[in-house]
């Protein structure tokens, strides 16, 4: 076994294999993957292997498109089959809101160059004849949807990586990751110690345990998930005789996805009575095994599916696959340099490895090899959560995310699980005044104030929501009179030391102000991309205060640490300082209570 390497990727699931391949593709050949068992021994081997581009975040959707297109290239490069079935897929809408969401997705896809199409019920019946289209308004057809062989695909990534010079050590368990003072790592395995410049955590089901070896908490949690494969279905058999493969059907109302498997069907569910798995940690005794079948949990979902896909009821159950896989609190992967760490990278929390694994591998490899990614990765950046996050927050959010996997996602939608989690000093006062709360970076912030018997939440909508009147009222009050606003939810940093000005001059794109003055400035990456928008206040020749987005604290601190300079200290004081912003043409009469000031003409 090699004893030095530039990168040690821990975990040989589809994600670790993709990271390894992409590192070699971008020119790093001295890289190795360490897998405690055989490749695919975590969630990967029992996945249903479905892939699709549909994702609420445009950048994630684009990366899913990249992943799907990559499979053909991998097959050509390696000569191995990924078992591709590009059968297309249709997502159904049984009410106007669901349909609106699909139309909005289609608009995004047009911009991204994806050839999706809105289809009506008659067309759906023609494309996907197992569907009972009663009550269906329409759907979104995506010709790129399909499925593959999870094991074949992982091995294709692995072979492509080996062809690029990578080494793969199976049956090699990582037991410790110890950082040396120079920032490199001793990766201790049951076969010896490897000295690595970088470590990548691609531990999948065990990502929490792998992270703990380096003292890092990764906010993810495994959930149980089940799909059923049926015996032969006559309709499918007849279609096959005509050389036609049935496409995928996603039925959000029934929280199910369905596809052809052999001569039968395969259907999986994101059921409401879902169950988290391994709450206290994933045991290393868990091998390539399945969980016991649990039909009680999916009884309602099955009954719904029998109405939508009547052929299912007539077919016997051939096999049941019930296994765990991990989710982050918002369902997106956790990728990138781990804040507060040197040379430690995350490639975990990937809940749709066959839709996203290629994109995750590409982005991480670009980050490591080229210093930054070609696209905006905020939606999957591990730094979108701060050090405030705990398992007590992660678990209910992961459950919520699983349950809402097929729900309509609305603009500005606020989700209720694990809230309130962190509050500002004004929380109780504002709550009494009718605050309608939003959440940023785990903190409750006021979106607007309801009055009288107005609802205390914004009704989710693709059209004008009930926030419109209240917001108009507040805008008018500030324009004609005066309003006050708590500014706790700003990222705040103190930059001090003899080189503070020189450092700011280097890190920020705009001018650094003189004593007693403020300036606004963008912060740019080395390639000139916008990575922050700051207000700099010069408190003294060696002291500055920066304010920026509250939700980007971990992201900004990571950048500051990566670009540190001797003679400069940067302290994150975001939660140590609060403040108020008073705006409007009229002077406020400052007689308490404070709420008298709130947006009253
Ligand atoms: C029932 C079911 C159906 C699914 N269907 C789909 C689907 O249709 N489409 C889709 O895209 N996704 C699907 N998924 C999700 C998919 O399986 C995951 O997204 C994917 O497998 C995650 O891959 P991974 O590489 O991150 O993790 P894993 O597959 O869990 O791999 C992690 C690897 O790390 C290794 N490891 C851990 N700790 C160590 C250590 N200390 N030392 C060395 N090695 C270590 C493990 O042995 C394991 O091989 C499904 C999941 C389930 C459970």
Image (spheres, rainbow, N blue to C red):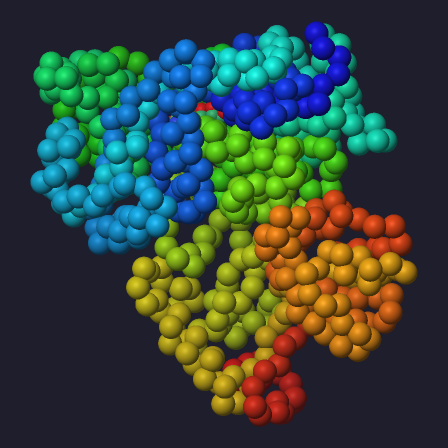
Q: Is residue 358 left or right of residue 383?
A: left
Residue 127, given in percent of the width and then of the height, sits at 15, 32
Residue 290, given in percent of the width and then of the height, sits at 44, 15
Whether residue 286 is situated above or below residue 468 in the rendered picture: above
Any part of residue 596 in sight: no
Q: Nearer the viewer, residue 18 or 161?
A: 161
> Which picture quadrant has residue 356?
top left
- The quadrant of the rendering that contains the N terminus is top right
> Residue at the location (82% across, 60% down)?
502
Whether residue 485 is situated above or below residue 585 in the rendered picture: above
Any part of residue 21 in sight: yes
> Residue at the location (14% across, 44% down)?
120
> Which picture quadrant has residue 445?
bottom right
Whether residue 32 is situated above or below residue 525 in the rendered picture: above
> Residue at the location (75% across, 16% down)?
4
Residue 46, given in percent of the width and then of the height, sits at 42, 18
Residue 581, given in percent of the width and then of the height, sits at 63, 77
């Amino acid at each position: 076994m090699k004893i030095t390497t530039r990168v040690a990727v821990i975990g040989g699931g589809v994600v670790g294999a993709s990271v390894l391949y992409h590192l070699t593709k971008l020119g790093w050949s001295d890289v190795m993957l360490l897998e405690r068992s055989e490749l695919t021994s975590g969630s990967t081997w029992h996945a249903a292997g479905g892939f699709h581009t549909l994702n609420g975040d445009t950048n994630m959707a684009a990366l899913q498109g990249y992943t799907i297109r990559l499979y053909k290239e991998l097959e050509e490069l390696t000569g191995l089959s990924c078992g591709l079935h590009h059968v297309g897929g249709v997502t159904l809408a049984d009410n106007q809101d669901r349909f609106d969401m699909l139309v909005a997705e289609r608009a995004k896809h047009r911009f991204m160059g994806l050839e999706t199409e809105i289809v009506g019920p008659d067309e759906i019946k023609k494309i996907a004849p197992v569907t009972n289209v009663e009550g269906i308004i329409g759907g979104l057809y995506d010709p790129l949807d399909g499925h593959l062989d999870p094991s074949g695909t992982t091995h294709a990534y692995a072979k492509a990586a080996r062809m690029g010079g990578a080494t793969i050590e199976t049956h090699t368990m990582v037991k410790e990751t110890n950082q040396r003072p120079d920032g490199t790592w001793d990766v201790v395995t049951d076969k010896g110690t490897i000295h690595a410049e970088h470590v990548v955590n691609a531990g999948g089901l065990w990502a929490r345990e792998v992270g703990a070896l380096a003292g890092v908490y990764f906010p993810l949690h495994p959930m149980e998930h089940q799909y059923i494969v049926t015996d032969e279905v006559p309709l499918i058999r007849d279609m096959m005789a005509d050389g036609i493969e049935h496409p995928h059907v996603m039925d959000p109302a029934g929280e199910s996805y369905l596809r052809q498997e052999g001569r039968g069907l395969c259907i999986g569910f994101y059921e409401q009575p879902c169950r988290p798995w391994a709450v206290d940690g994933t045991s290393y005794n868990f091998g390539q095994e399945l969980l016991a079948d649990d039909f009680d949990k999916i009884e309602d979902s099955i009954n719904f599916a029998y109405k939508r896909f009547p052929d299912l009821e007539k077919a016997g159950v051939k096999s049941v696959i019930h296994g765990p896989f991990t989710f982050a609190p918002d369902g997106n992967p956790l990728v990138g340099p781990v804040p507060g760490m040197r040379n430690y990278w995350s490639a975990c929390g990937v809940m749709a490895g066959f839709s996203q694994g290629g994109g995750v591998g590409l982005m991480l490899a670009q980050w490591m090899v080229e210093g930054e990614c070609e696209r905006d990765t905020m939606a999957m950046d591990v730094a979108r959560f701060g050090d405030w996050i705990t398992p007590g927050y992660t678990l209910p959010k992961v459950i919520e995310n699983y349950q809402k996997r097929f729900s309509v996602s609305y603009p500005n939608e606020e989700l209720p699980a694990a809230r309130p989690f962190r509050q500002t000093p004004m929380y109780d006062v504002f709550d009494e005044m009718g605050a309608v709360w939003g959440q940023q970076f785990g903190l409750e912030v006021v979106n607007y104030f309801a009055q009288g018997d107005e609802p205390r939440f914004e009704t989710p909508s693709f059209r004008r929501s009930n926030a419109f009147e209240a917001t108009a009222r507040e805008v008018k009050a500030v324009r004609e009179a005066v309003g006050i606003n708590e500014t706790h939810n700003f990222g705040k940093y103190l930059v001090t030391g003899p080189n503070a000005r020189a450092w700011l001059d280097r890190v920020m794109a705009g001018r650094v102000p003189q004593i007693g003055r403020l300036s606004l400035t963008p912060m740019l990456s080395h390639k000139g991309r916008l990575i922050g928008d700051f207000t700099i206040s010069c408190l003294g020749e060696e002291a500055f205060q920066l304010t920026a987005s509250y939700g980007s604290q971990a992201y900004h601190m990571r950048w500051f640490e990566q670009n540190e300079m001797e003679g400069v200290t940067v302290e994150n004081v975001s939660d140590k300082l609060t403040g108020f912003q008073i705006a409007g043409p009229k002077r406020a009469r400052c007689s308490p209570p404070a709420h008298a000031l709130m947006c009253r003409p």
